[in-house]
Image (cartoon, helix red, strand yellow):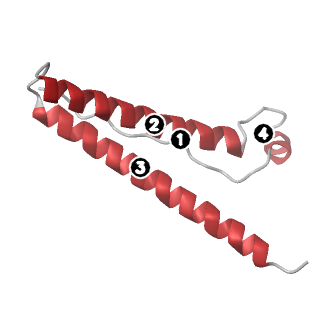
Amino acid sequence: MDQIKAITFPTVTLVDNAAASHVAGGASSTGFMDTLQHAISKANDIQLEADQSTEALMTGQTQNIHQTMVALQEADVSFQLMMQIRNKLVSAYEEIQRMQI
């Protein structure tokens, strides 16, 4: 029986590199953009896996409908998460635009 693998996304922190290296004692950390790009790339990979699984089911290469449905649900959840992150970023940007200097 196939096992369901967990979906993991990196934790997003809003700390700039200078502050992170100062706190960590000089250790480098990834920036916000790198973390965001990695999360988007991971979500895209999950989408591509779901497409491949669906295509394999439709062409008859596999009969495992359970695995295909799991892949589709993983893709849906990852897409929903990325949309929520995008909505929060747009909301924060709009909030900053409304600030008076």
Q: Secondary structure at mark 3?
A: helix
Relative to 71, does residue 100 appear above or below in the rendering? below
Cβ atoms at labels 1 and 2 below 8 Å apart: yes
How far apart marks 2 and 3 lie (CA) works out to 8 Å
Judged from the image, the secondary structure of the residue bearing numbered disc 4 is loop
Q: Mark 2 and mark 4 in contact (Cβ < 8 Å)?
A: no
Nearest to the eye among marks 4 and 1: give it: 1
Residue 79: image tag: 3
- Is label 4 or label 2 in front? 2
Q: Residue furthest right?
A: 101
Q: Is residue 23 left or right of residue 2?
A: right
Of pointers 4 and 2, the one earlier in the residue sequence? 4
- Where residue 88 appears, as percent x and y from the top left, is 58, 64
The residue at 76%/71% (across/down) is 96
Q: Amino acid at mark 4?
A: Ala
- The label number, if any, that marks residue 40 in the structure image: 1
Q: Amino acid at mark 2?
A: Asn
For the residue pair 36 and 6, the one nearer the viewer reads as 36
Element on which disc 1 rests: helix
For marks 3 and 4, give the CA distance.
33 Å
Q: Hey, what amino acid is under mark 1?
A: Ile
Q: Which residue bears the numbered disc 4?
A: 24
Instruction: Say whether disc 3 or disc 4 marks the residue closer to the N-terminus.
Output: 4
Q: The N terminus appears in which quarter of the rendering?
A: top left
Residue at 12% across, 22% down: 62
Query: Distance of mark 3 from mark 1, alpha carbons?
Result: 9 Å
**Quadrant of residue 98 within the rendered picture:** bottom right
Cα gap from disc 1 to disc 2, whole angstroms: 6 Å
Across and down, in percent, residue 66 comes to 13, 36
Residue bearing mark 2: 44
Could you tell me residue 33's position as x and y percent?
69, 43
